[in-house]
Structure formats: structure tokens, C-alpha cells
Image (spheres, rainbow, N blue to C red):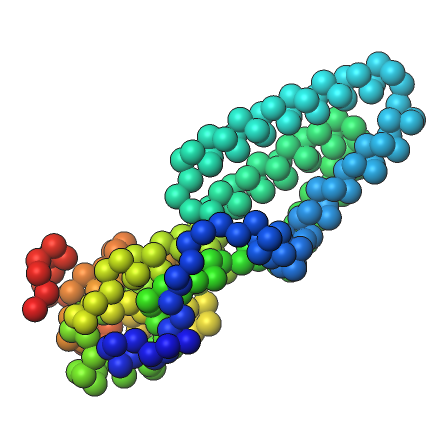
């Protein structure tokens, strides 16, 4: 933890961008979301071995062909996704989704009771565990709504604040959780600071910043403040925004030099 040059709260700067396989493996076996999925996926191996002892040769041959087809289709989708993916979190989310569909489909070929069991298992995992977001903070600050309001109204911090409002209960925020820290590392300076507010932890702040509670699935929302006044937001909502100051009256050109 270190204090930024804007006088804001302490932040954790992400210096490492290299892929660490040992750390990734440790995370997969320690995070409940990944661990539960691995256990369910690997449960198919002993089930398949036991079934092969009971099924006829023709049935085994048919099932093997379907398994090969499913495996090839999954690999093709995974390759396409990894080429087009924008973040590691998004790749994991989509490939796990494909794997659950294919596993349930092949289980249905084997026995519909097994397919129902897998469907129930994945539903339980969805309820009790969530995909962990990107861990790095970059040069951004984790803020409560009160801290954000204080920083904006004190007038002794950065002229511009770009704030991400998110909720990690939504998959979109998890899949894009690495974008904002990387952006903050590149563009943070004496005039522009970055902050994040978790609306999932502070739902009462949603209405105050002009985010309808029924539109949380549209998060993350990015709002640019200049001297405590909101000057731009993306994406825009139908509701009128009120964020620690007047409503939007101008739009700033981010390409313009900041003095």
C-alpha cells in the first residue's frame, strides 16, 4: 500500500503483468468458484469409467464418438475465444460456460438423470460462489461514496476524477475488472485521478449518482468529474444524474491537454 501523489487514499500499484502459472494454479484450487467447478468437471471421469463397464460395446462406441465431437467443438470455441478475448476473466467466464453446456449435453447422452444432477450442481455453484474479479488495483483508489464525496468537495486533490461504479455481483463487472486498473496505470497523473466505488456494497448510493437500482446489470458505469462537477458518463442512463453537484452542462474533450 502506498499513498498516491494526489493526496488520496492508499492504493496498491500493480507492477507485475507477467503470467505466473504457479499463482494461477494456487488460485484455482483455493477459490471456491474454481474449486467447485473443477470437482464437478472431474467427477465425470470416474462416472464414465464405471459406465463403460456396464454399457454394451455399441453404446460405448457411440458415446465415445459424441465425447470426441464435444471435445473438438469445445477446443475450437476456446481457441476462438482466446483470440478475441479482451481479458483473462472474460475468457474464463465464457470457457466455463461452454464447458458446462457440453458436459451437460454429453451427460444427457449417457443418462438423463446424470444430466439433471450436473444441472443442479452448476445451479448450486452459481448461487453459493461467484467468479473472483481481477485482483490488481493499478493506480486507482477503492472509495466509499462518502470518501468520494469528500475528495470531490475538498478541492485540494486532482482537478479531474474518473470514477468507475461497479458491482462484482454482475458478470460484466467481473469480466471487465482488469480494464480500469490498466487504464489508471497508463493515464494517472497530477491532474487526473482514478477511483472505484462498489455499488454492490453501497446500493443506497446508486440513486444519488443517477443509476437506477433496476439497471445494475448495466454496470460498470464510468463518470468523469471536473472540480466536483460531473461532465461526462458512459454509458448514459435515461434517469437524470445527480452526483455531488449540478447536472451535466458540458462535455470535456479528453484529448485536450490538462493544465
Expressed as whole percent of the image width and height from the top left, the position of residue 214 reads: 40, 60
Answer left or right for 91 relative to 204.
Answer: right
Expressed as whole percent of the image width and height from the top left, the position of residue 211 reads: 32, 64
Q: Residue furthest top?
A: 58
x 34%, y 56%: residue: 182
Is 89 rendered above or below residue 233? above
Residue 194 appears anywhere in the view: yes
Q: Which part of the image, by quadrant, shows the N terminus?
A: bottom left
x 7%, y 69%: residue: 259
Answer left or right for 90 relative to 256.
Answer: right
Q: What is the number of callouts on the image?
A: 0
Q: Quadrant of residue 15?
A: bottom left
Q: Residue furthest right?
A: 54
Is 46 rendered above or below residue 3? above
Answer left or right for 87 relative to 65.
Answer: left
Answer left or right for 181 relative to 66.
Answer: left
Residue 213 appears anywhere in the view: no
x 29%, y 79%: residue: 8
Expressed as whole percent of the image width and height from the top left, the position of residue 92 reads: 53, 45
Q: Nearer the viewer, residue 178 or 199?
A: 178
Q: Quadrant of residue 95?
A: top right
Expressed as whole percent of the image width and height from the top left, the position of residue 230 reads: 19, 68
Is 159 rendered above or below residue 58? below
Q: Quadrant of residue 108?
A: top right
Amino acid at each position: 500500500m502506498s499513498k498516491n501523489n494526489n493526496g488520496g487514499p492508499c492504493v496498491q500499484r500493480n507492477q507485475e503483468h507477467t503470467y505466473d502459472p504457479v499463482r494461477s494454479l494456487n488460485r484455482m484450487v483455493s477459490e471456491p468458484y474454481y474449486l467447485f467447478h473443477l470437482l464437478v468437471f472431474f467427477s465425470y471421469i470416474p462416472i464414465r469409467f464405471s459406465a463403460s463397464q456396464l454399457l454394451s460395446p455399441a453404446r460405448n462406441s457411440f458415446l465415445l464418438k459424441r465425447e470426441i465431437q464435444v471435445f473438438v467443438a469445445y477446443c475450437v470455441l476456446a481457441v476462438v475465444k482466446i483470440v478475441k478475448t479482451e481479458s483473462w476473466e472474460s475468457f474464463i467466464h465464457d470457457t466455463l460456460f461452454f464447458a458446462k453446456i457440453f458436459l451437460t449435453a454429453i451427460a444427457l447422452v449417457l443418462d438423463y438423470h446424470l444430466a439433471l444432477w450436473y444441472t443442479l450442481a452448476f445451479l448450486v455453484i452459481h448461487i453459493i460462489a461467484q467468479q473472483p474479479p481481477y485482483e490488481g488495483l493499478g493506480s486507482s483508489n477503492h472509495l466509499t461514496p462518502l470518501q468520494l464525496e469528500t475528495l470531490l468537495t475538498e478541492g485540494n486533490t486532482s482537478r479531474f476524477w474518473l470514477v468507475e461504479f461497479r458491482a462484482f455481483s454482475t458478470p460484466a463487472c467481473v469480466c471487465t475488472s482488469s480494464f480500469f486498473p490498466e487504464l489508471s496505470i497508463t493515464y494517472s497523473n497530477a491532474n487526473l485521478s482514478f477511483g472505484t466505488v462498489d455499488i454492490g456494497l453501497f446500493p443506497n448510493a446508486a440513486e444519488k449518482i443517477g443509476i437506477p437500482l433496476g439497471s445494475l446489470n448495466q454496470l460498470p458505469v464510468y463518470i468523469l468529474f471536473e472540480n466536483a462537477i460531473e461532465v461526462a458518463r458512459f454509458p448514459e442512463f435515461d434517469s437524470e444524474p445527480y452526483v455531488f453537484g449540478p447536472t451535466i452542462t458540458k462535455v470535456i474533450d479528453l484529448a485536450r491537454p490538462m493544465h
